[in-house]
Amino acid sequence: MAKRRDVQKRIGRKGEDVFQVFADDHRLLPTVPREDYGFDFLCHVEQSGIRTREISGDFVGVSVRSTSGHAQRVRLSRDDAETYLRAKFVVCFVLVAVETSASRVFHRFVDEAFAIKLSQFLSSERKYMTLRTRDCGTESEFDGNLDMAIRGNFPERVRLAVAHHNLSGRLLEPRLEVRRTSEDEYTIVAVEDFYSYFVKDNIPRQDETYAAIFGSPRLRLERLAQIGPLPEVEKELALLPSPVLIGRTAEYSFNLIAENSRGRDTLTLQRVDTKTYTGWVYEAGFSITISARKNHAGRWIHEIDALIDQGEELDLESHADLWRFLERCTDDAVVFPELEPKMRLETSYISGLRGAEFFARCLRSASRLPGWEHVRAPLRMATDSEVLHTIALLAEAETRPDFLQGFGFLVEHVGETASVASLKSLDGRLC
């Protein structure tokens, strides 16, 4: 069977021929790429002139589509849209209405408005978008639009507009600015809420981002850098030169009171707010967090938790204020901000706080044992049940020395080659 060429290919070829004549009349010098990767022509631009024209050094990628009949519309695929948006040069879409008498050429430069429309198309589930002649500029408008497109850094302005539009759906009031020096360039990305780069949505989650923000302030930025921005944010940032993220944070210091029937203690904390949590953060890796309301079994609740940073060696003996505060958080205690005395939270409502209180109380007793100065027991051990039971045993031994009477101890035999430093045992004076 002989090879055939369908009508669409004939129309497409006619449209490309029409564009080459059009280009010569409008200061474009079209070159056909050896292989087609999305652009039908790569065009140098001539400067304005009557007889002799200099080559401006500007460059335009042109994609030509052709149509005939009454429809006067074409379809763009998702690949087309992505190709136009990825280009780092001026892009012009050309729509040729092939007609028997005289074909007409329409155009649309990929400016801010068209680029956002293409981006919205990519964000949808649609496979194609339609472009009609009425959506495009006419031949009489081409020269003026071309001059606009080659003025300044047009492609960069388009990328910034798309990034700003897409980021606005995720971040609060983003602002983008490209800055250049003689050695480098970078993009300042500023938002009202710095943590919105990392917090997924409005649903409270105790994930790695939660642990980074409300854990140790000393490690916060390092941990957030390791986590990185949200994938949908990072996708937009990847199109910008060396993005630098800045933003505001809602933080201030305040005093938190722990009060029980025997007295009260005060702890200075930093209040840290995100869109899903409020945190009362201590300087060395302890915090109390209150979630935004969430639906649990058909009821709206707030989850309140005590968070102990597992990456910090928070030694209570070096933080006497926290030690006293935790000891005050007994069964009958309440905690409340000093300036908001009506916001009283019973300690039983704060998940994890009673365990921290038990650890702090037992540690106080155990620390009075002879030889304790050689022992380190950071607060993170309060979440280890085995260690917690050991501390409780030692506290009981200090409080009631006769407690150990009747106990037997099984000591594992250790070879003669073991070093004394490697042995873990109670000080002999405890026995």
Image (cartoon, grey):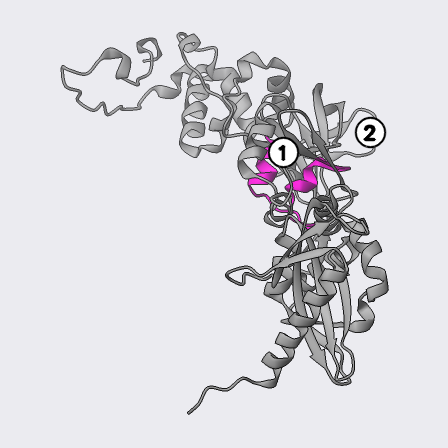
Closer to us: mark 2 or mark 1?
1
Using residue 291 as the reference point, say whether residue 221 is left or right of it: left
Camera-side residue of 240 and 353: 240
Question: Which stretch did the figure color magenta?
Answer: 188-215
Q: Residue at x 66, y 60 (%)?
A: 62
In the picture as drawn, the residue positioned furthest to the front comes out as 51
Camera-side residue of 172 and 205: 172
Distance from label 2 to label 1 (Cα)?
A: 26 Å
User: Residue 352, how many percent across, how many down?
Assistant: 58, 36
Q: Is residue 255 above or below residue 42?
A: above
User: Residue 351, how many percent across, how many down?
Assistant: 60, 39
Secondary structure of the residue carrying numbered label 1 = helix
Camera-side residue of 148 and 129: 148
Q: Is residue 422 above or below residue 115?
A: above
Using residue 28 as the reference point, say whether residue 397 is left or right of it: left
Q: Amino acid at mark 2?
A: Pro
Disc marking residue 213 = 1
In the picture as drawn, the residue positioned furthest to the bottom comes out as 1
Name the residue carrying label 2: 341
Q: Quadrant of the N terminus?
A: bottom left
Query: Quadrant of residue 107 in the image?
Result: bottom right
Question: Quick check: can you spot residue 170?
Answer: no
